[in-house]
Amino acid sequence: MHRRTALSVSTALLLAAPLLSACSGQARPGTAAVVGGERITTSAVQAQVNEVRAAQNRSGQSASELVASTPNLERQKLDSILQSRIIDKMADTAGVTVSAKEIQEERKGYVDDSKGSAQFEALFLQKGAMAPGQIDRFLRDRVLVTKLTAKYGNGKLEEPARAAAKALHIEVNPRYGAWDVKQIKLGAGDTPWITQRTRPEQAPAGA
């Protein structure tokens, strides 16, 4: 499979190593996570969810099918944010940077492989649950991980990833699950005291 169309592989899996152990005990109201002392708010996560839901509803594909295929979108979006912060920390430590030109070149490669911008954006929406405005962040991560791999060696990102995650002191609100070290992603977690009567990431009817 061509590297640019393998969207079933998440950004998290590009690191190929356990990254962090999230603490879920003392999240402040309105906080989805704390990373490097900085709050990631629940509203910031929900804004990303809303962008995806709006794009799904505008899509020529069946909106109901697209929505049904992403039932845990809040968790997925928070996971993506956490992964991006870890990659940024790794890059900063390693002195690795990425330019706007490099991101555009990466985008062009995907667009060319997809036979056009519309098909490219549709593919990312369908396979990656990314709205058009969220794709550049993914492409930035791709370029950084490629450079980090070149610096440390193929399959050698485990130690710098672990060091970056430790330095960030990540804490996650249990509403979004618990960090699964083996799977390198946010899992459902065991939080029976939290009951959600409705799925908060579900788009309102008629949106």
Image (cartoon, grey):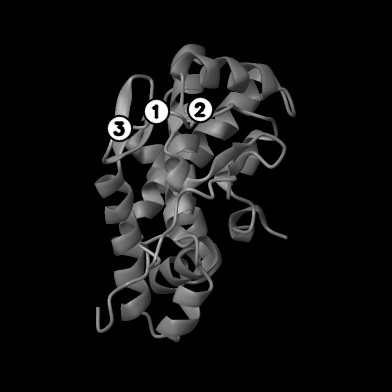
Among all residues in the image, which is located at the extreme front?
A: 193
Given contact means CB atoms under 8 Å apart, are the residues at marks 1 and 2 in contact? yes
Q: Distance between the residues labelled 3 and 2?
A: 13 Å
Residue beneath the point at 33% across and 49% down? 45
- Residue 67 placement, left or right of 27: right
Label 3: which secondary element: loop
Rendered location of residue 9, percent (x, y): 64, 52
Choose mark 1 or mark 2, whichever is in front: 1
Q: Mark 1 points at which residue?
A: 26
Label 2: which secondary element: loop
Residue beneath the point at 67% across and 30% down? 18
Q: Residue 78 carries which label?
A: none
Three-letter amino acid code at disc 2?
Cys
Given residues 152 and 61, the one toward you in this image is 61
Three-letter amino acid code at disc 3?
Arg
Query: Residue 14: which quarter of the image?
Result: top right
Label 1: which secondary element: loop
Rendered location of residue 169, percent (x, y): 46, 19
Q: How many marks?
A: 3
Given contact means CB atoms under 8 Å apart, are the residues at marks 3 and 2 in contact? no
Q: Mark 3 points at which residue?
A: 28
Residue beneath the point at 39% across and 26% down? 35
Q: Which of marks 3 and 2 is nearer the N terminus?
A: 2
Query: Residue 19: which quarter of the image?
Result: top right
User: As displayed, is residue 61 above or below residue 1?
Assistant: below
Given residues 6 and 195, the one toward you in this image is 195
Given contact means CB atoms under 8 Å apart, are the residues at marks 1 and 3 in contact? yes
Three-letter amino acid code at disc 1?
Gln
User: As displayed, is residue 174 above or below residue 47?
Assistant: above
Q: Name the residue under label 2.
A: 23
